[in-house]
Protein backbone atom coordinates (compact mmCIF):
# COMPACT_ATOMS: atom_id res chain seq x y z
CA UNK A 1 0.00 0.00 0.00
CA UNK A 2 1.86 3.00 -1.33
CA UNK A 3 2.24 6.00 0.97
CA UNK A 4 1.56 4.02 4.14
CA UNK A 5 4.48 2.90 6.30
CA UNK A 6 4.33 -0.90 6.42
CA UNK A 7 5.48 -0.81 10.03
CA UNK A 8 2.19 0.88 10.94
CA UNK A 9 0.22 -2.00 9.49
CA UNK A 10 2.48 -4.49 11.22
CA UNK A 11 1.97 -2.70 14.54
CA UNK A 12 -1.79 -2.32 14.19
CA UNK A 13 -3.24 -2.86 17.66
CA UNK A 14 -5.70 -5.71 17.09
CA UNK A 15 -6.23 -6.18 20.84
CA UNK A 16 -7.43 -2.58 21.18
CA UNK A 17 -9.68 -2.88 18.13
CA UNK A 18 -11.10 -6.15 19.46
CA UNK A 19 -11.99 -4.64 22.85
CA UNK A 20 -13.68 -1.67 21.16
CA UNK A 21 -15.62 -3.91 18.78
CA UNK A 22 -16.85 -6.14 21.60
CA UNK A 23 -18.15 -3.18 23.60
CA UNK A 24 -19.89 -1.60 20.59
CA UNK A 25 -21.60 -4.89 19.67
CA UNK A 26 -22.65 -5.43 23.29
CA UNK A 27 -24.08 -1.93 23.34
CA UNK A 28 -26.11 -2.48 20.16
CA UNK A 29 -27.48 -5.81 21.43
CA UNK A 30 -28.41 -4.18 24.74
CA UNK A 31 -29.98 -1.19 23.00
CA UNK A 32 -32.14 -3.49 20.91
CA UNK A 33 -33.61 -4.90 24.11
CA UNK A 34 -33.99 -1.50 25.78
CA UNK A 35 -35.95 -0.19 22.75
CA UNK A 36 -37.51 -3.51 21.78
CA UNK A 37 -40.14 -3.11 19.05
CA UNK A 38 -42.74 -5.65 17.95
CA UNK A 39 -41.32 -5.79 14.41
CA UNK A 40 -38.03 -4.65 12.93
CA UNK A 41 -35.35 -2.50 14.52
CA UNK A 42 -36.29 0.47 16.70
CA UNK A 43 -35.43 3.90 15.35
CA UNK A 44 -32.88 4.36 18.14
CA UNK A 45 -31.01 1.24 17.03
CA UNK A 46 -30.88 2.48 13.42
CA UNK A 47 -29.53 5.83 14.56
CA UNK A 48 -26.96 4.17 16.77
CA UNK A 49 -25.76 1.99 13.89
CA UNK A 50 -25.43 5.15 11.79
CA UNK A 51 -23.42 6.76 14.62
CA UNK A 52 -21.18 3.66 14.71
CA UNK A 53 -20.50 4.21 11.01
CA UNK A 54 -19.64 7.90 11.52
CA UNK A 55 -17.50 7.07 14.55
CA UNK A 56 -15.64 4.35 12.63
CA UNK A 57 -14.83 6.82 9.84
CA UNK A 58 -13.60 9.35 12.43
CA UNK A 59 -11.56 6.60 14.11
CA UNK A 60 -9.65 5.64 10.96
CA UNK A 61 -9.22 9.22 9.72
CA UNK A 62 -7.57 10.08 13.04
CA UNK A 63 -5.42 6.93 12.92
CA UNK A 64 -3.99 7.74 9.48
CA UNK A 65 -2.42 11.06 10.53
CA UNK A 66 0.61 10.83 12.83
CA UNK A 67 -0.59 11.89 16.27
CA UNK A 68 2.36 14.31 16.64
CA UNK A 69 0.71 16.57 14.05
CA UNK A 70 -2.30 16.94 16.33
CA UNK A 71 -0.14 18.82 18.82
CA UNK A 72 -0.06 21.79 16.43
CA UNK A 73 -3.82 21.53 15.97
CA UNK A 74 -4.60 21.21 19.67
CA UNK A 75 -5.30 24.87 20.37
CA UNK A 76 -7.40 25.51 17.21
CA UNK A 77 -9.46 22.38 17.98
CA UNK A 78 -9.86 23.47 21.60
CA UNK A 79 -10.89 26.96 20.49
CA UNK A 80 -13.45 25.53 18.05
CA UNK A 81 -14.93 23.41 20.84
CA UNK A 82 -15.24 26.48 23.08
CA UNK A 83 -17.00 28.35 20.28
CA UNK A 84 -19.46 25.48 19.85
CA UNK A 85 -20.14 25.48 23.58
CA UNK A 86 -20.72 29.24 23.49
CA UNK A 87 -23.04 28.83 20.49
CA UNK A 88 -25.37 26.64 22.52
CA UNK A 89 -25.95 29.54 24.91
CA UNK A 90 -27.23 31.60 21.98
CA UNK A 91 -28.90 29.15 19.61
CA UNK A 92 -29.81 26.01 21.60
CA UNK A 93 -33.32 25.64 22.99
CA UNK A 94 -33.84 24.70 26.62
CA UNK A 95 -34.34 20.92 26.73
CA UNK A 96 -34.96 19.18 30.06
CA UNK A 97 -33.64 22.22 31.89
CA UNK A 98 -30.39 22.72 29.94
CA UNK A 99 -29.11 24.33 26.74
CA UNK A 100 -26.80 21.58 25.59
CA UNK A 101 -27.96 20.56 22.10
CA UNK A 102 -27.71 22.08 18.63
CA UNK A 103 -29.48 21.17 15.37
CA UNK A 104 -32.66 19.82 16.94
CA UNK A 105 -30.88 17.55 19.38
CA UNK A 106 -28.47 16.06 16.85
CA UNK A 107 -25.25 17.60 18.20
CA UNK A 108 -24.03 17.89 21.79
CA UNK A 109 -20.91 20.12 21.74
CA UNK A 110 -19.94 19.21 25.30
CA UNK A 111 -19.10 15.69 24.08
CA UNK A 112 -16.62 16.98 21.52
CA UNK A 113 -15.22 19.42 24.09
CA UNK A 114 -13.80 16.42 25.99
CA UNK A 115 -11.52 15.59 23.06
CA UNK A 116 -10.55 19.25 22.63
CA UNK A 117 -9.74 19.42 26.34
CA UNK A 118 -7.42 16.41 26.36
CA UNK A 119 -5.63 17.67 23.26
CA UNK A 120 -5.04 21.07 24.90
CA UNK A 121 -3.90 19.56 28.21
CA UNK A 122 -1.65 17.01 26.48
CA UNK A 123 -0.01 19.83 24.53
CA UNK A 124 0.46 21.88 27.71
CA UNK A 125 2.05 19.10 29.79
CA UNK A 126 4.21 18.04 26.82
CA UNK A 127 5.60 21.55 26.41
CA UNK A 128 5.75 22.29 30.14
CA UNK A 129 7.06 19.20 31.96
CA UNK A 130 5.80 19.85 35.48
CA UNK A 131 8.43 18.22 37.69
CA UNK A 132 7.14 18.38 41.25
CA UNK A 133 4.28 20.82 41.78
CA UNK A 134 4.72 22.59 45.11
CA UNK A 135 2.09 25.33 44.90
CA UNK A 136 -1.38 25.94 43.50
CA UNK A 137 0.07 28.72 41.34
CA UNK A 138 1.86 26.09 39.25
CA UNK A 139 -1.52 24.57 38.40
CA UNK A 140 -3.03 27.88 37.32
CA UNK A 141 -2.63 27.42 33.56
CA UNK A 142 -3.90 23.82 33.29
CA UNK A 143 -6.70 24.76 35.72
CA UNK A 144 -7.68 27.60 33.38
CA UNK A 145 -7.72 25.23 30.40
CA UNK A 146 -10.11 22.98 32.34
CA UNK A 147 -12.19 25.86 33.70
CA UNK A 148 -13.04 27.31 30.27
CA UNK A 149 -15.15 24.39 28.96
CA UNK A 150 -16.44 23.51 32.45
CA UNK A 151 -17.63 27.09 32.97
CA UNK A 152 -19.45 27.18 29.63
CA UNK A 153 -21.12 23.83 30.38
CA UNK A 154 -22.21 25.15 33.80
CA UNK A 155 -23.81 28.09 31.98
CA UNK A 156 -25.68 25.50 29.89
CA UNK A 157 -27.03 24.23 33.23
CA UNK A 158 -25.81 20.71 32.44
CA UNK A 159 -24.20 20.03 35.80
CA UNK A 160 -23.61 16.32 35.25
CA UNK A 161 -21.54 16.87 32.12
CA UNK A 162 -19.75 19.81 33.79
CA UNK A 163 -18.68 17.52 36.65
CA UNK A 164 -17.64 14.83 34.18
CA UNK A 165 -15.53 17.29 32.15
CA UNK A 166 -13.88 18.53 35.34
CA UNK A 167 -12.99 14.97 36.36
CA UNK A 168 -11.61 14.16 32.90
CA UNK A 169 -9.35 17.21 33.05
CA UNK A 170 -8.28 16.33 36.59
CA UNK A 171 -7.09 12.89 35.41
CA UNK A 172 -3.74 14.43 34.53
CA UNK A 173 -3.07 15.47 38.11
CA UNK A 174 -2.81 11.78 39.09
CA UNK A 175 0.15 11.40 36.71
CA UNK A 176 2.24 14.39 37.80
CA UNK A 177 4.12 14.78 41.06
CA UNK A 178 2.21 17.03 43.45
CA UNK A 179 3.36 17.77 47.01
CA UNK A 180 1.04 16.89 49.89
CA UNK A 181 0.67 20.58 50.77
CA UNK A 182 -0.57 21.29 47.27
CA UNK A 183 -3.00 18.36 47.54
CA UNK A 184 -4.27 19.87 50.79
CA UNK A 185 -4.82 23.18 49.03
CA UNK A 186 -6.65 21.42 46.19
CA UNK A 187 -8.87 19.64 48.74
CA UNK A 188 -9.73 22.90 50.52
CA UNK A 189 -10.52 24.61 47.22
CA UNK A 190 -12.71 21.65 46.21
CA UNK A 191 -14.67 21.80 49.48
CA UNK A 192 -15.24 25.55 49.08
CA UNK A 193 -16.32 25.03 45.46
CA UNK A 194 -18.79 22.29 46.48
CA UNK A 195 -20.32 24.49 49.19
CA UNK A 196 -20.69 27.38 46.74
CA UNK A 197 -22.12 25.05 44.13
CA UNK A 198 -24.74 23.73 46.55
CA UNK A 199 -25.74 27.19 47.79
CA UNK A 200 -25.72 29.24 44.61
CA UNK A 201 -25.73 27.02 41.50
CA UNK A 202 -27.65 23.78 41.96
CA UNK A 203 -31.37 23.81 41.30
CA UNK A 204 -33.68 22.32 43.98
CA UNK A 205 -34.30 19.17 41.91
CA UNK A 206 -30.53 18.63 41.59
CA UNK A 207 -30.12 18.99 45.35
CA UNK A 208 -32.90 16.45 45.87
CA UNK A 209 -31.12 13.93 43.64
CA UNK A 210 -27.97 14.22 45.76
CA UNK A 211 -29.98 13.76 48.97
CA UNK A 212 -31.65 10.70 47.43
CA UNK A 213 -28.27 8.93 47.42
CA UNK A 214 -28.17 9.24 51.21
CA UNK A 215 -31.86 8.37 51.68
CA UNK A 216 -33.31 6.70 48.55
CA UNK A 217 -36.77 6.35 50.12
CA UNK A 218 -37.26 10.03 50.90
CA UNK A 219 -39.19 10.66 47.66
CA UNK A 220 -39.77 7.29 45.94
CA UNK A 221 -42.37 8.53 43.42
CA UNK A 222 -40.47 11.60 42.21
CA UNK A 223 -36.76 12.39 42.58
CA UNK A 224 -35.92 8.91 43.90
CA UNK A 225 -37.98 6.97 41.37
CA UNK A 226 -35.25 6.39 38.77
CA UNK A 227 -32.67 5.17 41.26
CA UNK A 228 -35.13 2.84 42.99
CA UNK A 229 -36.35 1.27 39.74
CA UNK A 230 -32.74 0.84 38.61
CA UNK A 231 -31.80 -1.04 41.77
CA UNK A 232 -34.88 -3.24 41.41
CA UNK A 233 -33.81 -4.10 37.85
CA UNK A 234 -30.23 -4.87 38.89
CA UNK A 235 -31.36 -6.96 41.84
CA UNK A 236 -33.95 -8.93 39.85
CA UNK A 237 -31.23 -10.06 37.43
CA UNK A 238 -29.67 -12.30 40.06
CA UNK A 239 -26.68 -14.39 39.05
CA UNK A 240 -27.58 -15.33 35.47
CA UNK A 241 -30.26 -12.78 34.56
CA UNK A 242 -33.85 -13.06 33.43
CA UNK A 243 -32.92 -13.67 29.79
CA UNK A 244 -32.56 -11.50 26.71
CA UNK A 245 -35.72 -9.48 25.99
CA UNK A 246 -37.30 -10.96 29.13
CA UNK A 247 -36.45 -8.35 31.78
CA UNK A 248 -39.71 -7.22 33.37
CA UNK A 249 -38.41 -3.83 34.50
CA UNK A 250 -37.07 -3.22 31.01
CA UNK A 251 -39.84 -4.59 28.81
CA UNK A 252 -42.65 -3.11 30.94
CA UNK A 253 -40.86 0.26 30.83
CA UNK A 254 -40.49 0.76 34.57
CA UNK A 255 -36.92 1.93 33.93
CA UNK A 256 -36.79 5.58 32.83
CA UNK A 257 -34.29 6.49 30.07
CA UNK A 258 -33.32 2.83 29.98
CA UNK A 259 -31.65 3.16 26.59
CA UNK A 260 -29.40 6.06 27.68
CA UNK A 261 -28.52 6.69 31.34
CA UNK A 262 -29.74 3.30 32.60
CA UNK A 263 -28.51 1.00 29.84
CA UNK A 264 -26.39 -0.87 32.39
CA UNK A 265 -29.55 -1.61 34.41
CA UNK A 266 -30.98 -3.37 31.34
CA UNK A 267 -27.79 -5.40 31.01
CA UNK A 268 -27.76 -6.39 34.69
CA UNK A 269 -31.43 -7.42 34.65
CA UNK A 270 -31.27 -9.56 31.52
CA UNK A 271 -27.75 -10.98 31.80
CA UNK A 272 -27.36 -10.98 35.58
CA UNK A 273 -24.29 -10.57 37.73
CA UNK A 274 -22.20 -12.70 35.36
CA UNK A 275 -23.08 -10.55 32.34
CA UNK A 276 -22.38 -7.35 34.27
CA UNK A 277 -18.99 -8.62 35.45
CA UNK A 278 -18.02 -9.73 31.94
CA UNK A 279 -18.93 -6.31 30.52
CA UNK A 280 -17.09 -4.41 33.23
CA UNK A 281 -14.08 -6.69 32.72
CA UNK A 282 -13.94 -5.69 29.05
CA UNK A 283 -13.97 -2.04 30.14
CA UNK A 284 -11.22 -2.74 32.68
CA UNK A 285 -9.02 -4.44 30.07
CA UNK A 286 -9.56 -1.49 27.72
CA UNK A 287 -8.57 1.03 30.39
CA UNK A 288 -5.51 -0.96 31.46
CA UNK A 289 -4.45 -1.38 27.85
CA UNK A 290 -4.72 2.38 27.43
CA UNK A 291 -2.35 2.87 30.38
CA UNK A 292 0.06 0.33 28.85
CA UNK A 293 0.02 2.34 25.62
CA UNK A 294 0.71 5.53 27.59
CA UNK A 295 3.63 3.87 29.42
CA UNK A 296 5.27 2.74 26.18
CA UNK A 297 4.68 5.91 24.18
CA UNK A 298 7.82 7.34 22.62
CA UNK A 299 7.11 10.93 23.66
CA UNK A 300 5.30 12.78 26.42
CA UNK A 301 2.58 14.13 24.11
CA UNK A 302 1.54 10.61 23.13
CA UNK A 303 1.69 9.48 26.76
CA UNK A 304 -0.46 12.39 27.95
CA UNK A 305 -2.87 11.88 25.07
CA UNK A 306 -3.32 8.23 26.03
CA UNK A 307 -3.81 9.15 29.69
CA UNK A 308 -6.48 11.68 28.75
CA UNK A 309 -8.36 9.14 26.64
CA UNK A 310 -8.33 6.69 29.55
CA UNK A 311 -9.94 9.48 31.59
CA UNK A 312 -12.55 10.10 28.88
CA UNK A 313 -13.61 6.44 29.21
CA UNK A 314 -13.06 5.83 32.92
CA UNK A 315 -14.96 8.70 34.51
CA UNK A 316 -18.28 8.35 32.67
CA UNK A 317 -18.16 4.56 33.09
CA UNK A 318 -17.49 4.87 36.83
CA UNK A 319 -20.15 7.55 37.35
CA UNK A 320 -22.73 5.70 35.26
CA UNK A 321 -22.32 2.39 37.10
CA UNK A 322 -22.33 4.17 40.47
CA UNK A 323 -25.49 6.03 39.41
CA UNK A 324 -27.20 2.80 38.33
CA UNK A 325 -26.35 1.15 41.67
CA UNK A 326 -27.56 4.14 43.69
CA UNK A 327 -24.05 5.11 44.83
CA UNK A 328 -24.08 8.44 42.96
CA UNK A 329 -26.84 10.93 42.11
CA UNK A 330 -28.66 10.65 38.79
CA UNK A 331 -26.75 13.17 36.69
CA UNK A 332 -27.33 12.01 33.13
CA UNK A 333 -23.98 10.43 32.27
CA UNK A 334 -24.12 7.69 29.59
CA UNK A 335 -21.98 4.54 29.59
CA UNK A 336 -19.29 4.99 26.88
CA UNK A 337 -19.72 2.88 23.72
CA UNK A 338 -22.79 1.32 25.30
CA UNK A 339 -25.56 3.82 25.95
CA UNK A 340 -27.65 5.35 23.18
CA UNK A 341 -26.36 8.70 21.94
CA UNK A 342 -24.80 9.65 18.64
CA UNK A 343 -22.55 12.49 19.82
CA UNK A 344 -21.22 10.44 22.74
CA UNK A 345 -20.53 7.38 20.59
CA UNK A 346 -18.80 9.30 17.79
CA UNK A 347 -16.70 11.18 20.36
CA UNK A 348 -15.68 7.96 22.14
CA UNK A 349 -14.65 6.30 18.88
CA UNK A 350 -12.74 9.40 17.80
CA UNK A 351 -10.91 9.48 21.15
CA UNK A 352 -10.05 5.80 20.76
CA UNK A 353 -8.68 6.63 17.32
CA UNK A 354 -6.07 8.78 19.07
CA UNK A 355 -5.27 5.88 21.39
CA UNK A 356 -4.82 3.54 18.42
CA UNK A 357 -2.68 6.21 16.76
CA UNK A 358 -0.30 6.36 19.72
CA UNK A 359 -0.21 2.57 20.02
CA UNK A 360 0.67 1.99 16.35
CA UNK A 361 3.47 4.56 16.35
CA UNK A 362 5.21 3.62 19.58
CA UNK A 363 7.58 1.36 17.59
CA UNK A 364 7.98 3.53 14.51
CA UNK A 365 10.17 6.43 15.67
Image: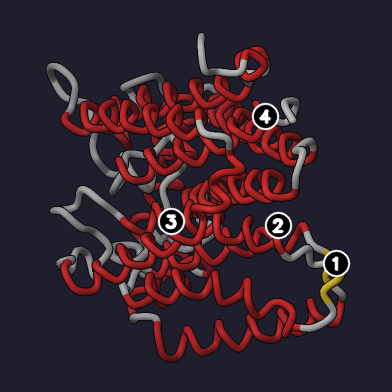
Identify the mark nearer the N-term, 1 or 4. Answer: 1
Give the Cα separation between the discs numbered 3 and 2. 17 Å
Which is nearer the eye, 349 or 270?
Answer: 349
Residue 68 vertical position relative to residue 226 in the rendered view, above or below? above
Quarter of the image with the C terminus is: top right
Which is nearer the eye, 247 or 181?
Answer: 181
Identify the mark nearer the N-term, 4 or 3. Answer: 3
Residue that appears at 73% across and 41% down: 294
Which is nearer the eye, 218 or 107?
Answer: 107
Residue that appears at 66% across and 85% down: 189
Residue that appears at 83% across and 70% down: 178
Q: How many marks?
A: 4
Q: Secondary structure at mark 4?
A: loop
Taking the image as shown, residue 204 lies to the left or right of residue 6, namely left
Q: Quadrant of residue 220?
A: bottom left
The residue that label 2 is drawn on is 126
Give the Cα separation between the discs numbered 4 and 2. 17 Å
- Numbered badge on residue 361: 4
Identify the mark nearer the N-term, 3 or 1. Answer: 3
Amino acid sequence: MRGIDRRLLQNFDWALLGLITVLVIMGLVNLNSATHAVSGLAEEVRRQIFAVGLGTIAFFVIVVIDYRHYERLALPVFGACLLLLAATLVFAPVTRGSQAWLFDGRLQPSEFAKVGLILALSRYFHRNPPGEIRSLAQLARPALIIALPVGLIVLQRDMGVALLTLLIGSTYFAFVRISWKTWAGIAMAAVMALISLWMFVLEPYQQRRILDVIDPGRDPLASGYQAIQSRIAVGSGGLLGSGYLDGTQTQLRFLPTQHTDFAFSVLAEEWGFIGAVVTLSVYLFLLLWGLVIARHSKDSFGAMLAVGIVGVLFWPAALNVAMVLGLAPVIGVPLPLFSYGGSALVTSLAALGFLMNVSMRRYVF
